[in-house]
Image (tube, rainbow, N blue to C red):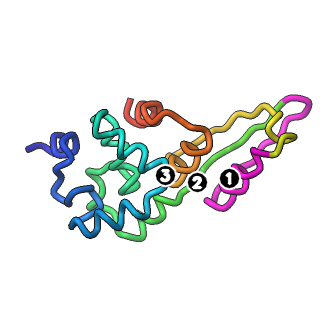
Amino acid sequence: MSSFSQLATGRSKLGPCLECSSFADERRCRETAGAYRKHIRAISRGWPHLRYLTDFMTVSTVPLRYSDLSAAERQERANRVNISVVEYGDELSSTNLKTPDELDEFLSCLSDSEVSQKSRLILVQDLSTCMIEKLGAAFDIEPGFTSATMYG
């Protein structure tokens, strides 16, 4: 079975999900997943093209590169944030978000009515599990859009 077929059918060499080597690890993986990733995982059963996105979010890289990365590299990739927010209208300003905490703070401010009235352009670079999870949940991004953005 080719690597692609293993991914498409969910039967990989690494266990039930790409990061997990056992069903106990799979349970831990499900428990630590955010709500957006759980949603994608649930609907990927009916939409197999989303399985690759689920696997990416699990291992923080293209699944075939998983074994080439150390645990520290996978952790760094999972939490990487590289977002520029350009606010425009009466005046122009820009903010760079580089950490998960900065992203959380930005997203929490969006509910403020004064802030929510601004027009903004959000530029996301080098997608990571953290960014997909947080932005997907905050803006209710359709998983197919994220998957198409990443894999064409």
Disc 3 on helix, strand or loop? helix
Position of residue 18 relative to residue 127, above or below, is: below
The residue carrying pointer 1 sits among few (fewer than 14), some (14 to 19) or many (20 or more) residues within 10 Å by Cα, namely: some
Disc 2 on helix, strand or loop? loop
Instruction: Name the residue nearer the viewer: 43 or 66.
Output: 43
In the rendered image, which residue does mark 1 sit on?
97
Of mark 3 and mark 1, the one earlier in the sequence is 3
In x, y percent, where is residue 48?
27, 35
Tell me the CA gap for discs 2 and 1.
7 Å
Q: Please tell me the numbered disc located at residue 35.
A: 3
In the rendered image, which residue does mark 2 sit on?
81
In x, y percent, where is residue 92?
85, 35
Instruction: Name which quarter of the figure residue 122 lies in.
Output: top right
Task: Residue at 47% x, 31% y: name it.
Answer: 145
Q: Residue 91 in magenta?
A: yes
Q: Which residues are magenta?
A: 89-111
In x, y percent, where is residue 44?
32, 39
The kind of residue on which mark 1 rests is: Leu
Question: Which of the two discs, 2 and 3, sits closer to the camera?
Answer: 3
Q: Please tell me the numbered disc located at residue 60.
A: none
The residue carrying pointer 3 sits among few (fewer than 14), some (14 to 19) or many (20 or more) residues within 10 Å by Cα, namely: some
The kind of residue on which mark 2 rests is: Val
Where does the N terminus fall, quadrant-wise?
top left
Tell me the CA gap for discs 3 and 1.
22 Å
In x, y percent, where is residue 4?
19, 41
Disc 1 on helix, strand or loop? strand
Task: Residue at 18% x, 42% y: name it.
Answer: 9
